[in-house]
Amino acid sequence: MLTILKNRFEQGYRTSTYPKTKIELPARYRGLPKVNPEASLALAEQCAAACPQDAIDATGRTIDMGRCIFCGTCERLCEGGFISFTRNFELSTAHRRDLITGGDLPALADHAKKHFKSLFGRSLQLRQVSAAGCNACEVDLNVLATPFFDLARFGINFVASPRHADAIVVTGPISRNMKTALLQTYEAVPAPKVVIAVGSCAISGGPFRGSPETTDGLEKLMPVDLFIPGCPPHPLTNLHAFLNFFK
């Protein structure tokens, strides 16, 4: 016990002060993309043609963050002249259509926050379902339980059983073999319940979009209340989404 207390004293307070204080991510982080409406159509079309996810609309001057895997190909190609990625990690939306953007996102709906707070109070229990994910999104959700992020201090926890959950958090492209298990998990969560799609695979199918073995977006199977884009979303992106949508 003395050794534990000594280690705790030496290490000090390690938990992040977010959201009370703002966190600046490293320059290499790719967050909310910004589209330059003044860029030439030729440059925009060049970026659109190079996008592996077909996420760029050159004519409409928008990028679909639900498809984007944040690889940075477009930014490198145009040298930031048409698309540049900021360090803003606050990417989540309550509606799929809002992920198609030129660089601006609406705030997570105030009415949704009030609605869910009245239902769940100060406690939220999440059941995570990896529907054939590569484990990247899953890992960045898992780290929210570490002392640095300490998700539990906000009354939010991941639980083992869907019958104990208020919401399901879905990652992965939802393979044909996982579809039944996912639907059964959804049915097992007592109403009222919330569905959260995390990562480009869950939102749009990601790199597997169009494959007969996967589903092109969770919305094709069930209503989705919260979309958290990324490949994978940064832990702070997930944390921001949970706190602002439910609290």
Image (cartoon, rainbow, N blue to C red):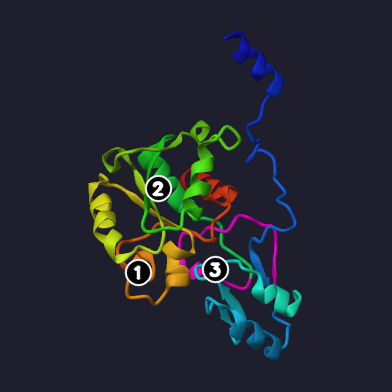
Residue corresponding to mark 1? 214
Observer able to see residue 142: yes
Other residues around mark 1 within 10 Å, as few (<14) / some (14–19) / many (≥20): many
* Distance CA(mark 1)–CA(mark 3): 19 Å
Disc with the residue nearer the chain's start (3 vs 2):
3
Q: In this rendering, which labeled residue sits more in front, label 2 or label 1? A: 1
- For the point 73% across and 52% down, which residue is it? 26
Name the amino acid, label 1: Thr
Name the amino acid, label 2: His
What range of the chain is rendered magenta? 83-102
Vertical side of 231 occupied by 116: above or below: above
Q: Position of residue 106 (x, y in %)?
A: 56, 62
Residue corresponding to mark 3? 65
Label 2 sits on a secondary structure element that is helix
Label 1 sits on a secondary structure element that is loop
Does the residue at mark 2 contact the one at mark 1 (Cβ under 8 Å)?
no
- For the point 68% across and 57% down, which residue is it? 29
